[in-house]
Image (cartoon, grey):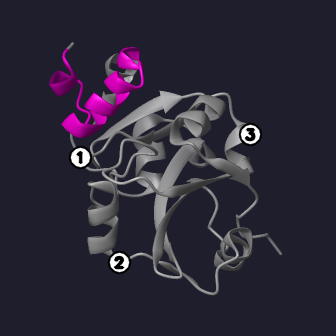
Amino acid sequence: MTPSDSGAHPRFAEALRELGLDELTARVRRFPDATRTAAEAAAAIGCELSQICKSLIFAADGVPVLVLMDGASRVDLERVREELGADKVTRARADVVRETTGYAIGGVPPFGHLTRTRVLADRSLLDHDVVWAAAGTPYAVFPLAPKDLIAHAGATLVDVRERIA
């Protein structure tokens, strides 16, 4: 299977190749309908919502930062702000997401972006043996062990999910 046949975005397939992860292109699952939300992806895959790895771009004092979060949880912006030592953290606008990553919201993978950004990965991802993340489009996902995903993303392991009351 060539990278273009895998269903992964060509740029992401190239990133996999550069990381020596060519075998992952054969594990990419492509869906006929977009899975833009974690719930849609989990339903299409047939996995738990928390097994989806969301790749979310925020702006910390105007600087893009990637947060990897399990699909069942929400990011606590205050905890991200504290972790980064920033004055203000907001969700990045769609144009900033595309400029930073090269991908549209709903298809942002955890690595293989246009620009290098700081990456935070929530510890909740480690609750599973395998998580699923976007492969550069809202139509494709790939499985990977959380520790490997975090390592390839160059992420710092943190606790930034919203606390449940």
Q: Earlier in the sequence, mark 3 or mark 2?
A: 2
- Provide residue 154's location: percent of width, then percent of height: 57, 42
Task: Give the quadrant of the C terminus.
Answer: bottom right
> Residue tagged by mark 3?
127
Which residue lies most toward the bottom here? 87
Residue at 46% from the left image edge and 45% from the top image edge: 110
Instruction: Report the magenta residues as a range.
Output: 2-23
Measured along the vertical axis of the image, is residue 64 above or below residue 22?
below
Q: Is residue 121 left or right of residue 100?
A: right
- Tell me the kind of residue under disc 1: Asp
In terms of image quadrants, where is residue 81?
A: bottom right
In terms of image quadrants, where is residue 11?
A: top left
Q: Is residue 109 magenta?
A: no
Dot 3 falls on a residue whose secondary structure is helix
Task: Give the quadrant of the N terminus.
Answer: top left
Q: Are marks 1 and 2 in contact (CB under 8 Å)?
A: no
Query: Of tags 3 and 1, which is closer to the observer?
Result: 3
> Residue tagged by mark 2?
93
- Tell me the kind of residue under disc 3: Asp
Q: Earlier in the sequence, mark 3 or mark 1?
A: 1
Query: Of tags 3 and 2, which is closer to the observer?
Result: 2
Q: Earlier in the sequence, mark 1 or mark 2?
A: 1
Numbered tag placed on residue 33 in the rendering: 1
Residue at 41% from the left image edge and 58% from the top image edge: 37
- Provide residue 87's location: percent of width, then percent of height: 64, 87
Residue at 27% from the left image edge and 46% from the top image edge: 137
- Provide residue 41's location: percent of width, then percent of height: 42, 46
Dot 2 falls on a residue whose secondary structure is loop
Label 1 CA crowd tier, 10 Å (few <14, some 14–19, many 20+): few
